């Protein structure tokens, strides 16, 4: 009889622990959905879509990065940490928060979503990563040319000539190019 009571007590406490775990899980899920609902409404998307499990992450990728297909990188286990960092940065920049806020969003996304959803952070638009990378490379090219002139190195050639002084068609500016007939 004692063994049966001990078994029932163990079952009871096990079910209580499982119930508390489910209650905690559903509570976190609800808090996340409420924060995302407000974020979606700021972006002009119907708030109820935050309650659909995978679709909400797809929408978040589309809202913040311009393309929903970035979400599918989350399904590749080795890329998950990298994509989560990218998500955190892109989400915070899309809502006008700084990149430092991305650290909070990465480690505590529920709190980050509530702050972005209910705070004074307006939706500023998609931060299309491809365009950002292009801008970074273009800015790097523009910075590189003046630095080489200031360093006393070779000056950058004008746009219509190659560095050795020849025009793009192979003729030199003074008429002594290979096709000019001079010196033959």
Image (spheres, rainbow, N blue to C red):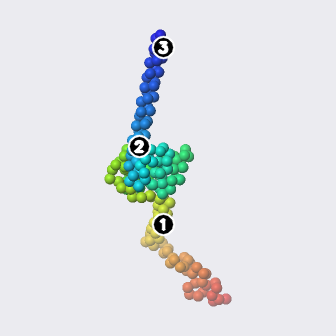
Residue 64's label in the rendered image is none
- Position above or below: 44 against 153: above
| Label 1 SS | helix
Q: How many C-alpha atoms fall within 10 Å of the one at disc 2: few (<14), some, or many (≥20)? A: some
Q: How many C-alpha atoms fall within 10 Å of the one at disc 3: few (<14), some, or many (≥20)? A: few
Residue that carries the numbered disc 3 in the rendered image: 4
Q: Nearer the viewer, mark 1 or mark 2?
A: 2
**Residue 76 visible from this viewpoint:** yes
Residue that carries the numbered disc 1 in the rendered image: 138
Q: Nearer the viewer, residue 92 or 78?
A: 92
Residue that carries the numbered disc 2 in the rendered image: 32
What residue sits 41% from the left and 34% below the top? 24
The furthest residue to the right? 184
Question: Along the horizontal axis of the image, is 169 left or right of 98?
Answer: right
Q: Nearer the viewer, residue 47 or 58?
A: 47
Quadrant the C terminus occupies? bottom right
| Label 3 SS | helix
What residue sits 43% from the left and 47% below the top? 48
| Label 2 SS | helix
Gap in angstroms between the C-alphas marked 3 and 1: 75 Å
Q: Position of residue 56 (x, y in %)?
A: 47, 48
Q: Position of residue 106 (x, y in %)?
A: 43, 46
Q: Position of residue 40 (x, y in %)?
A: 41, 51
Which sits earlier in the primary sequence, circle 3 or circle 1? Answer: 3
* Pointers 1 and 2 in contact (C-beta within 8 Å): no
Gap in angstroms between the C-alphas marked 2 and 3: 42 Å
Q: Nearer the viewer, mark 3 or mark 1?
A: 3
Which sits earlier in the primary sequence, circle 2 or circle 3? Answer: 3
Gap in angstroms between the C-alphas marked 1 and 2: 38 Å
């Amino acid at each position: 009889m004692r063994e049966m009571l001990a078994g029932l007590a163990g079952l009871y406490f096990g079910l209580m622990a499982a119930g508390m775990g489910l209650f905690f899980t559903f509570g976190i899920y609800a808090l996340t959905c409420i924060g995302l609902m407000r974020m979606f409404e700021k972006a002009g998307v119907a708030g109820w879509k935050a309650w659909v499990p995978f679709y909400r992450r797809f929408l978040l990728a589309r809202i913040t990065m311009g393309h929903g297909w970035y979400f599918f990188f989350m399904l590749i286990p080795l890329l998950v940490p990298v994509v989560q960092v990218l998500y955190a940065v892109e989400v915070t920049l899309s809502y006008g928060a700084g990149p430092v806020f991305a650290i909070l969003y990465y480690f505590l996304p529920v709190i980050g979503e509530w702050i972005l959803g209910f705070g004074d952070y307006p939706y500023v638009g998609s931060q299309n990563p491809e365009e950002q990378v292009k801008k970074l490379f273009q800015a790097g090219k523009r910075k590189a040319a003046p630095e080489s002139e200031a360093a006393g190195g070779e000056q950058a050639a004008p746009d219509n000539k190659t560095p050795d002084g020849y025009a793009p068609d192979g003729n030199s500016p003074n008429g002594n190019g290979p096709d000019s007939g001079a010196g033959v």
